[in-house]
Amino acid sequence: MYSIFSSYLHENFFALDNKKIKKDILKIKSKDQGRILSNYGGWQSKSFEELNKNFENLFNKINFSVKEIEKQLNLEKKLSLDNYWCNINYFGSFNKPHNHPGAVISGVYYVSVPKNSGNIIFQQFRSDIDATYPSVKNYNQYNSTKWTIVPKENLCVLFPSYLLHYVEPNLNKKERISISFNYGF
């Protein structure tokens, strides 16, 4: 059996100095009031189009993963980093359902992840799937309309930019810190 019309979800763990990355993000926050897009509560930095040298190691690793997906998609053009931004979700903060129009691959890297600080949920709108498979024992990538990833420190998740996703509320008193990004042509 093989899958048709499948989407990719690429997960990697990167061995990086998250204490330093967190310090760099907090430094950015001290100079940036933030913006509101999909985030409810919390802080999201402005969008960066130029790579900050402090994040070079991270994006070198992400670039390698993006190249793997590029091969799988059989793209004629090479993808490159369009933009990235930093996120801090405090207690009760979450991200509303959204996608990333104009990009090809989007992703998130988790810097600091306390327990119960909000899963990322990927969703596809297929109203017919529940009617087609009314008695599913265990959900998997073939029979579900939602896919949940429990974030962990050092985890990088890459996904198609068109895929609708949201982040559940942070139920921990400690903040969850991440870096989100888009790749395009």
Image: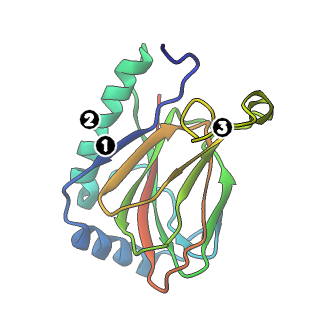
Q: Quadrant of residue 164?
A: top right
Q: Is residue 97 above or below residue 86?
A: above
| Residue 41 percent location from the top left of the image | 63, 76
Q: Secondary structure at mark 3?
A: loop
> Badge 1: few (under 14), some or many (20 or more) residues near its Cα, within 10 Å?
many
Reply above or below: 40 against 164: below
Instruction: Give the mark nearest the N terminus, 1 or 3.
Output: 1
Q: Is residue 37 visible?
A: no
N-term mark: 3 or 2: 2
Q: CA distance from mark 1 to mark 3?
A: 35 Å
Return the x and y of residue 145 as percentages of the image width and height: 66, 40
Q: Secondary structure at mark 2?
A: helix
Residue 20 visible, this orientation: yes
Write the residue at 57% across / 41% down.
138
Horizontal side of 42 relative to 129 (left or right) equals: left
Residue closest to the eye, 81 or 75 = 75
What is the three-letter code of the residue carrying label 2?
Answer: Phe
Of the numbered discs in the image, which one, if any, rests on residue 19?
none
Query: Mark number for residue 64?
Result: 2
Residue at the (58%, 29%) spot, across then down: 142
What is the three-letter code of the residue carrying label 1? Ile
Estimate how packed mark 3 is, as few (under 14), some (14 to 19) or many (20 or more) residues with alpha carbons within 10 Å: few
**Mark 1 lies on residue:** 62
Q: Which residue is mark 3?
A: 136
Q: Amino acid at mark 3?
A: Val
User: Is the C-beta separation of discs 2 and 1 under 8 Å?
Assistant: yes
Question: Where is residue 29 shown, x and y percent of the image?
Answer: 44, 76
Using the image as rendered, state which of residue 174 and residue 77 is in the foreground.
174
Q: In the visual, does 86 lie left or right of 134?
A: left
- Residue 92 drawn above or below residue 124: below
Task: Quadrant for residue 113, please give it.
Answer: bottom left
Element class at badge 1? helix
